[in-house]
Image: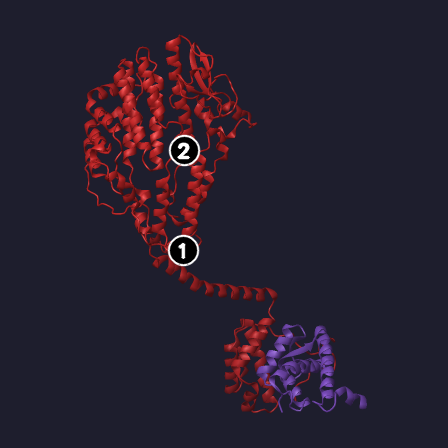
Chain colours: A red, B purple
Amino acid sequence: MPDAAPHADTHPAAAAPAGATAAPAHRGRWQAIVNAADLPAPLAALVRDTIRRSRLWRSERADLARELVAHFRDGIAAGRSVDQLAADFGDPRAAARLITRAKRRGRPAWARGLATTWRGLGAIFLLCIPTYLYLGARYYLGRPNITHNYAAELNRPILATPVDERAWPLIIEAIKACGQFPQSLEQASWPNGPEDPAWADAVEYLHTHRDALALVRRAAAAPVLGYVYSGRIDPDLSKAYEVRRPGYKAEPEPDVENPMLVGVLLPQLGEFRRFSRMLAADATDAALAVDRERFMAEIDASFGLARLCWSEPMVISQIVGIMIADATLRTASERAFTPGLLNDDDLVKLAHRVGAFGDDSLQFNFSSDRLMYEDFLQRFYTDNGRGDGVPIHAELPQVARDFGFADPSLKPLVRFALPVLTATNASRAEIARQAEATMAAYEHDQNLPMWRRSERVSDAERVRLIAMVSQTLRFMESLTAGSSMERDLLTRDLFEMRRDALLTALALETFHRKTGGYPAALDELVPRYLPRLPIDGADGRTLRCTLVDGRPLLYSLGADGDDDGGRPPLKGNKEARRFFDVGPDTTDPDLLKVIDGDWILYPTPPDQSDR
Amino acid sequence: MRIERELMRGAGPVAVLKLLQRREMYGYELVEALAERTQGVLDMGQSTLYPMLYNLEAQGYIKGIWRTGESGKDRKYYQLTGKGEKRLAKDSEQFERLTAALARLGVISQSPVTVAAKA
């Protein structure tokens, strides 16, 4: 007969039973409890088996052990046989399972919440494994479908042009003819007048290298630039560098059959800029020597170099073309009015030459930018044949090495993470769509005049595109860095304004020579002296003109948008231009001081860097 | 005769709660009481009883307390809680209605209510 509790016939909610001891601590190893119980071996084994199979906390196991031991002791005390007790207990496996489930239900809320969380995380982890395997296989086993050689596409018209119509071979010869530059002339910019300490060296060098300048003039007159795009340095240029830099040894480089377009070398641009500076210095020397023929030849050649760069398919080449043309404008503006230098016909010829660069408005050619994105997509994405695909690893290590980056997949953690990181990348079709939107924005923006620049959207579209590409090239982000199209357009707009100001100045000079005075308004110049009125990029109206010390001064309203009578900004044109987009509505007094004033376009501001 | 598992799942907890309504009991005692007082009908294996007790405890219907009985043995006594009382009342009412319904259908001969009324 089982022991009755001390208050067997009272409700358990009644007072605590007399003689009862405190509840034993539920701590301790359950094995020790079973061992100490001295149960018959089959029952002890049953208890052990049940507890071992349960997945309970240590204290729960101890509690269970204590209770089962008490149970079997009671059974034995009641005269039950070991076999009968074991049979009555049932299947220990089922018991363990049910007990575990029931005990867990009784755990505190935080423990149940934690268990649910762990189960959730475990389920997510299990789901992640096949997902990761799929992404990993897709990323590492996917192959690109490189069908186009875009560099070859750019080179096709160049290679179809006879060599004697290309400027580049003559430029190579000119580099050789230049030999080693004196130390004072190795700097990026050449001196542009006698006030520069290096001027004497420059003049001596120019006088002793007429053959080189003659080659440059011939090159500038060639129909095409003729540089062949390649992923390695032009071997002929490499040989020419041996002449320019004593000690330099040209090392033959293996040709890259299908170079990544964004990685083709553009050494011609640096050479063209260097030669344009030489020409500018020689034009200045000619002006000082009142040598009209040489002056005109060098200005003509310098515009020729600008034209060749501008005609190239890459926007960066076109920007260099504008920069060379802009520098030529400066030289012409500063020196063309040297007394006794140019006759009336020369002024007209110069005006035609200046006006010929860009005619009305320069229109960028974005075709190679489009090709660069197509080339990027064919190398870093799969091709499903329907214009879509996913990012893949195949070309990444090679491209990283080509561009001098560490191969990202060499780091195990990065290698592991790449499939997941790239899973969120834009798809091939998305990038292609964004590239098209960006190109469309470029076309839209370049047709907007400067005074409507606030409507330009290029950079917003471009930022979206770069963000997408950067995701794929996340370890080579500098590959995606580049110029801002809106800044490039501003460079173009400012050049056009300065170009038109010089054309107006030449027309005013011609008018002055013929009439002995200046017109009361610029309208009087059109059409006899000037085909059209120059436009102020600040407001779309005619450039402002005033006489200062009896000489014309042409200016734009500038960043503040009001007419200050030709007074330059306190800190110069360039500083004021930095805040061009702030506009006249700003209330910042410091900024108002900087933008207050007009941009002087002619004559060139004394500080040549402040244009 | 032991009853089917599905029926036991519903009847077992009510039976345990009912036994504990009178007084607190420990595990083996409950096994014996169930077997004796139901003439073996609700004689359940311990692999069923203990999980049932732990479930009732987890739901707050009973509370287990370790005590040393008069025999000097440590045992875990289970008490009915207030919540368990309510649950028992509710389950009892439902069983009464169930058995009455079964009686009306002739599944069982007489409902306990009828028996009690006759007594």
- Side (left or right) of A379 relative to A244: right
In this rendering, the answer to whether A87 lies above or below A557 is: below
**Picture quadrant where residue B14 is located:** bottom right
Tell me the crowding category of disc 1: few under 14, some 14 to 19, or many 20 or more residues within 10 angstroms, Cα based: some
SS at mark 2? helix
Q: Position of residue A175 (x, y in %)?
A: 22, 30
Please state which of residues A569 and A358 is positioned toward the viewer in this rendering: A358
Name which residue type carries label 1.
Ala
Q: x%, y% of residue A234?
A: 23, 39
Badge 1 sits on which subunit?
A
Res. A545 in view: yes
In the figure, B14 relative to A228: above or below? below
User: In the visual, does A180 lie left or right of A533?
Assistant: left
Q: Which residue is mark 1?
A: A417
Numbered disc 1: secondary structure: helix
Seen from the viewer's position, the closer of residues A282 and B65 is A282
- The residues bearing labels 2 and 1 have C-alpha atoms spaced at a distance of 37 Å
Residue A220: image quadrant is top left
Chain label for disc 2: A
Q: Is residue A223 above or below residue A39?
A: above
Indicate the quadrant containing the C terminus of chain A: top left, top right, bottom left or bottom right: top left
Identify the residue shown where x is 48% and y is 32%: A453
Q: Tell me the tag on residue A488.
A: 2
Residue at point 72%, 88% (across, down)? B105
For the N terminus of chain A, the image quarter is: bottom right
Q: Is residue A524 left or right of residue A402?
A: right
Residue located farthest toward the right when viewing the structure as drawn:
B118
